[in-house]
Amino acid sequence: MRTFFLTFSFLVLLVSCKEETKNETAKEREIQNYTINQFMDNESVSGGSFSSDNSKLLVSSNRSGIYNVYTIPVTGGELTPITQSDSTSYFANSYFPDDDRMLFSADNNGDEIDHIYVRELDGNIKDVTPDDGAKSEFYSWAEDDKHFYYGSNKRDPRFFDVYKMSIDDYSSSLLYKNEDGMDLSGISNDENYFALSKTINTNDSDLFIHNAKTGETLKINENLSGNSAQDFSKDSSKLYYTTDDSSEFEYLMSYDLETKESKKVLEKSWDILGVSFTSGGSYMTVFVNEDGKNAIEVLSSETMKPIELPDFGNKSITSVSFSDDEKWMRMYVGGSNAPSDLYTYNLETKEQYKVTDVLNKDINPEDLVSATVVRYKSFDGVEIPAIYYLPHQASEENKVPAMVWVHGGPGGQTRQNFNSLIQYMVNQGYAILAVNNRGSSGYGKTFFQMDDRNHGEKDLQDCVEGKNWLAKQPEIDGDKIGILGGSYGGYMTMAALTYAPEEFDVGVNIFGVTNWMRTLKSIPPYWEAFREALYKEMGDPFTADSVRLKRISPLFHTDKVTKPLIVLQGSQDPRVLQVESDEIVEGVRKNGVPVEYVLFEDEGHGFVKKENQIEAYSRIVKFLDTYLKKENEPLDGETISTEIDSESN
């Protein structure tokens, strides 16, 4: 025992010394500063459907400046473009099971009205869901490989019905008419059972099994809890689902479709986010949200024991999928300081291939910063988890400014993934504390529900306490701390500047909600199934709740804003309307406060075009350099208030 303890202690000391040496080396050498163009020259690749002969993968990439669809050899090589759009982004769905036709999807510059497209063998591209104003979503392939399932709200804009489309003539038939606001979660291979969910509130949902033969719909869960269908067994005898019934975190259950008995299958210390079977049913993939980081296991379905996966050192496998014959696996591998690359792995030969190399070769990987998970106490003693990025060049002698970063939601989570904007800001000398305030997902349902009807209040105090934590760090200039966020995080930015106007030195609002009454009234029709749940959490704008909603809406308190502000918005955004940003800018400008407004005519809720990302991110850092670092600060009384649109760049 003593020998083990000494050996273990030595190893801990050795690892600690290595980490300290690495940090000292980074501080001793000169860290290169990169331009936003260099950071955005990193390639983003997603997807990875195997062709029927396992020779190619179908992926999406933004190498052209926007997302297009490409194929790439399974062992690596050049990407071959399938779409060559210079305006609309296209995203890969799947190869056809028995030939080289392809499925992909696209909306119209961020309006979220997606259509499904087929690329024929002769190269022609056909919109197979052409209904005007209708949103369509690819679900999965049918067991016969001659049809695929998809959802569409063409019958009723509020709800998604389930359709089955023939790949011979692209005719479709209605499988399930959704008149009760259900969400499809899966279809059994024999098409007899449909897994459906009904949202109760933002945490809880009921899970149902619909029998297509009898028409019977049966609720599975007995108690109010969060339930999510994951997959049916290969033989259509069981449904696997996750639940948090009587637990803080989600665990895996199986439901016998004949006996109607439920049985616990797998439980972890964190949420099991997803479970899926391979096409042949030999393997089960399990995704766990482990303290804001993906932890993935591939289990043998027969033994429920993990199979051996390649070791990628300090990088993590963030996503996996298999070929239909289960001989190949594709993986995305990355980390907080490394964008995810695509790898393939042959399960028979154990050969592995790095298919992409997405990091810009101009960037030294050693100049990028790894995330650290930290925790601090909020005003009432609640422990708040956060992801911390400290610039290599920061020290007690060289203090740096910092930003509190707030995720979207409500109910989102900042995770330990690579983020180009974060790495660019850190490289330019800004520390980032990405706060997972109360109400964030991933830390148990009690924590998740703590901000219900407390938005802009207790969760804002968590952000203020994050600022206070930063100010105590020896490497941070406590007089130079701002706040930044997108969507709900943008709301939190404006809440901070209006309700705690002296706490933060600047604000960066990226398409943030500023008028809750208008936003909650203008929810897109296809969110109908979620609308009531959101009203339960936030408040119903059509009732007496409107009094509180007005009180927590920054638009009505712009006279309190005293600190510089930059606002960024996409005019096609269907969730946070452009008028939200227009009016907050107009209101704050009346105070004589420096305001910048960056408007993109061809973006929605999130900026996906590289040229727009470059413009947006460079404007953010330039703004921070001016008003937080105080470099080239305008003369007293000068207000910078420029508006741009993407077409004029």
Image: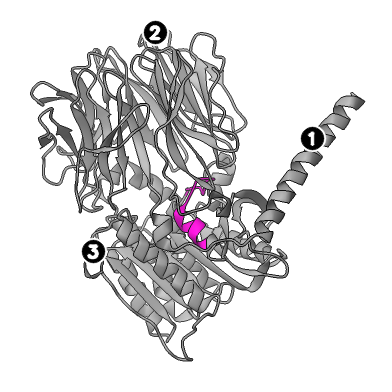
Q: Amino acid at mark 3?
A: Glu
In the figure, is residue 566 to the left or right of 465?
A: left
Residue 103's place in the image compared with 549, above or below, is above
Q: Is residue 550 visible?
A: no
- Residue 605: image tag: none
Q: Nearer the viewer, residue 311 or 479?
A: 311
Q: CA distance from mark 2 to mark 1?
A: 53 Å
Q: Quadrant of the N terminus?
A: top right
Q: Nearer the viewer, residue 348 or 475?
A: 348
In the figure, is residue 259 to the left or right of 438?
A: left
In the image, which residues are magenta? Answer: 411-425
Q: CA distance from mark 3 to mark 1?
A: 56 Å
Q: Amino acid at mark 2?
A: Glu
| Location of residue 429 in the rendering, given as x and y in whole percent from the top left corner | 57, 66
Give the residue at mark 1.
Answer: 11
Q: Secondary structure at mark 1?
A: helix
User: Magenta segment: does it hold 228?
Assistant: no
Q: Secondary structure at mark 3?
A: loop
| Location of residue 290 in the rendering, given as x and y in whole percent from the top left corner | 58, 36
Q: Secondary structure at mark 2?
A: loop
Give the residue at mark 2.
Answer: 258
Residue 148's place in the image compared with 570, above or below, is above
| Location of residue 202 in the rendering, given as x and y in whole percent from the top left corner | 44, 43
Give the residue at mark 3.
Answer: 601
Q: Amino acid at mark 1?
A: Leu
At x 40%, y 74%, the residue is 556
Residue 69's place in the image compared with 414, above or below, is above
